[in-house]
Image: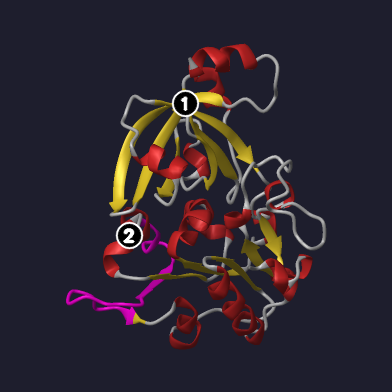
Amino acid sequence: MYLVRWLVLKFLSPYVPKLAKVLDVIEETPDIKTLKLRYIDEEEQRRFSFRPGQFAEVSVFGYGEAPFAIASSPSRSSEHFEVSVRAVGTVTRAIHALKPGDIVGVRAPLGKGFPIENFYDMNVIVLAGGTGLFAVSSLLHYICEHRHEFRDVVLLYGSREPRLIPRRYDLDYWSKYIDVYLTVDKPDETWRGFVGVVTQLLDKVPTPRGPHTVACVCGPPIMMRVSIPKLLSLGISRNRIYLSLEWKMQCGIGKCGHCMLSNGKYVCLDGPVFALSEIREEDIR
């Protein structure tokens, strides 16, 4: 019934999602799964491309839709694309129940992503906490695949526990090209890395600084707010600190008003990535 309704609406609304098949489901952690998706229309998939930091609205028919960062490499977008999903509500639990071969709806790419052209010949600090890693994953893939375009690059990532660290295969891959530092709040008996919140790594590990450095941040709002004065103290200007506010989004098309900022902009339309100079601290909540 839902597929029939989709076929009827396809030619009536520009906001109807395109159909995509679930190619694979990867269980990352007890509450996070990654879906590899491919449009059913081969021509649609061949033309598909996105900028680092853009997102997709994924719908499960009968349950609804939700926004997720596109976490895979932009260079492989003509083959497939990936979203990593933490099960926290009705839609995300329905996504976790999907199996390879199932059909979902996708509207993508949405948003504006990172202004990667401003990062060339610059040092880059990427600071992420929890599921905020997904919002910067495509950026990290791009940087590693074009490594000669950037100076020193550092990823600082924090998780609550070692068992909750997702996309370990990406972390291993990125560590071949950039400096990767991990920390956890609660170590187990196997953990040999840093312990503490991720913002503390800015004081513990070598990080680039000065006017030739940009910083990209995504994670829990409190983590992002704490990181701002630390990054400013490294001599990074407000217009070179980029924040992904992806957790604020809902409809993805600026209609629900859920993600409107204090300056009247919408995260889903004008972001989700903003320079610190474009927003107010009250927006990071």
The amino acid type found where label 1 is placed reads Ala
The residue at 51%/51% (across/down) is: 138
- Residue 71 belongs to the span the image colors magenta: no
Q: Residue under label 2, please give it.
A: 172
Q: Quadrant of the C terminus?
A: bottom right
The amino acid type found where label 2 is placed reads Asp
The residue at 61%/38% (across/down) is: 109
Residue 150's spot in the image, x, y percent? Answer: 57, 63
**Relative to 141, does residue 208 appear above or below in the rendering?**
below
Q: Residue under label 1, please give it.
A: 20
Crowding at dot 1, Cα within 10 Å, few <14 / some 14-19 / many 20+, comes out as many
Residue 220's spot in the image, x, y percent? Answer: 52, 67
Q: Which secondary structure lies at badge 1?
A: strand
- Magenta segment: 173-194
Asked whether residue 93 appears in the rendered view, the answer is: yes
Please state which of residues 109 and 266 is positioned toward the viewer in this rendering: 266
